[in-house]
């Protein structure tokens, strides 16, 4: 009888405890589980908002820069492409040198152009060598003016010899060109306006003496002329 | 009048201390349930607000992408321009013999026209001059010009001859920091 009474006493206490504590425990567990889930969802959403805001800022800035720079970049890219062409500019260079020789009243002959030579960093150069004859001042004036020509040309070496007041010069110049870039940035990649150094360089190359022509086009004919002598 | 009767035997009733504790636990449970409901409603509202904000920003982003894409031509030209300018800047760093050309004029400044430059070989790093001078004045002027030039930091008078016709000089000029 005593054992039975004791067991019934424990059971009643347990029931009371269970009734009172169980809801508390359940709510705490719910708080923990639901809270963790909710916080993770909200955090993920906040991260997405942050990322979207960054993209919005980049695109907005990019839009403004492209609008303000469109004219400069169009004119500038043309000038830059003439200064550093995408393909072998030997014909333009020879034309420029001949015009310069004529302007300085010197005689130019024995013009030769080399095959393109690759350098490191995507640059390629061709070497053009020629002879000049004329007064010393005219030759020196010619030589000084070479580096103001477009495409950009540098003097590699000069050999001068003077005889009876006239100078004969053997000159070798290098002209560089480079292939066009192959990739453009992705739409969400930021861009910036030209730096002051870039603007200064652009101004400098815009002032170079432009060639008479920038591209060589070949005449196309539909049918082969059976008589090449034109009769 | 109703009366609360506890028909449980005294030895089966819950003790007073425990009873008070359990009452507190029950109140706490109710409070926590209410707090939980408020928490869920709050988080739900915040979630909805954030979603709406995200959707608005995303719409704006899509509009901006369309506008930027419409200016793809300008972007390509800007990329091309930057590429060219970068390469031109590296080309300008390459040594050139042109910088040494101006040296000839400065070396021969204030001299008579009788002098003869029998040979000059110029490259980006050095210049070799062979001169024939026919007067003492020209020689003094030339040596003075050599002394005062800042275009070359290495000067060597390789040969110096004096004959019936005048002076013959071979001068090697070097510039370790050409261009």
Image: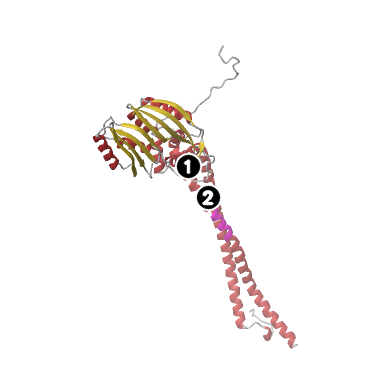
- Pointers 1 and 2 in contact (C-beta within 8 Å): no
Instruction: Identify the residue at horizontal 54%, vertical 51% (top origin).
Output: B54
Q: Nearer the viewer, residue A90 or A7?
A: A90
Q: Which residue is mark 2?
A: A52
Q: Nearer the viewer, residue A217 or B54?
A: A217
Same-chain status of marks 1 and 2: yes
On screen, residue A202 versus residue A114, left or right, reads: left
Whether B152 is drawn above or below A213: the answer is: below
Asked whether the viewer can see residue A162, the reply is: yes
Q: Which mark is residue A179?
A: none
Q: Position of residue A121 (x, y in %)?
A: 50, 42
Can you say which quadrant of the picture contains the C terminus of chain B?
A: top left
Whether B149 is drawn above or below B17: the answer is: above
Q: Position of residue B41 (x, y in %)?
A: 57, 60
Q: Secondary structure beneath disc 2?
A: helix
Question: Toward which corner of the image does residue B59 lie, by quadrant?
Answer: top right
On screen, residue A193 versus residue B9, left or right, reads: left
Q: Residue furthest top?
A: A231
Q: Residue furthest bottom?
A: A2
Q: Position of residue A180 (x, y in %)?
A: 51, 37
Q: Which mark is residue A63?
A: 1
Chain to which the residue tagged by mark 2 belongs: A
Q: Nearer the viewer, residue B47 or A55?
A: A55
Boundaries of the magenta span? A39-49
Magenta run includes residue A18: no
Q: Nearer the viewer, residue B92 or B82?
A: B92
Instruction: Identify the residue at horizontal 61%, vertical 77% (top origin).
Output: B22
Q: Position of residue B126 (x, y in %)?
A: 38, 40
Neighbourhood count class around disc 1 (C-alpha, 10 Å): few under 14, some 14–19, many 20 upward: many
């Amino acid at each position: 009888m005593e054992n039975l009474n004791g067991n019934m006493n424990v059971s009643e206490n347990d029931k009371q405890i269970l009734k009172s504590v169980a809801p508390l425990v359940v709510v705490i567990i719910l708080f923990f589980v639901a809270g963790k889930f909710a916080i993770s969802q909200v955090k993920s959403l906040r991260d997405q908002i942050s990322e979207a805001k960054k993209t919005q800022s980049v695109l907005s800035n990019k839009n403004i820069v492209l609008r303000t720079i469109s004219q400069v970049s169009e004119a500038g890219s043309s000038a830059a492409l003439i200064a550093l062409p995408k393909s072998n500019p030997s014909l333009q260079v020879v034309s420029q040198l001949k015009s310069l020789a004529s302007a300085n009243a010197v005689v130019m002959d024995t013009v030769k152009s080399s095959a393109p030579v690759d350098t490191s960093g995507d640059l390629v150069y061709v070497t053009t060598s020629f002879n000049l004859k004329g007064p010393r001042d005219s030759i020196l004036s010619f030589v000084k003016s070479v580096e103001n020509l477009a495409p950009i040309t540098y003097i590699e070496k000069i050999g001068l010899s003077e005889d009876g007041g006239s100078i004969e010069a053997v000159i070798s110049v290098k002209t560089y060109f480079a292939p066009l870039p192959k990739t453009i940035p992705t739409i969400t990649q930021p861009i910036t306006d030209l730096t002051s150094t870039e603007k200064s360089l652009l101004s400098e190359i815009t002032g170079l003496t432009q060639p008479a022509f920038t591209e060589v086009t070949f005449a196309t004919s539909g049918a082969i002329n059976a008589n090449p002598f034109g009769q | 009048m109703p009366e609360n009767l506890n028909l449980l035997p005294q030895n089966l009733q819950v003790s007073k201390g425990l009873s008070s504790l359990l009452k507190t636990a029950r109140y706490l449970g109710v409070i926590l349930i209410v707090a939980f409901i408020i928490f869920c409603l709050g988080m739900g509202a915040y979630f909805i607000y954030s979603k709406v904000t995200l959707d608005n920003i995303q719409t704006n982003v899509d509009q901006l992408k369309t506008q930027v894409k419409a200016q793809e031509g300008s972007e390509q030209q800007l990329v091309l321009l930057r590429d060219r300018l970068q390469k031109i800047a590296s080309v300008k760093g390459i040594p050139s013999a042109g910088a040494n050309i101006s040296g000839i004029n400065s070396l021969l400044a204030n001299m008579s026209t009788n002098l003869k430059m029998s040979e000059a070989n110029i490259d980006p790093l050095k210049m070799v001059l062979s001169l024939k001078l026919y007067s003492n004045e020209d020689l003094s002027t030339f040596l003075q010009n050599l002394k005062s030039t800042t275009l070359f930091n290495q000067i060597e008078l390789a040969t110096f001859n004096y004959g019936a016709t005048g002076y013959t000089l071979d001068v090697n000029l070097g510039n370790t920091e050409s261009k």
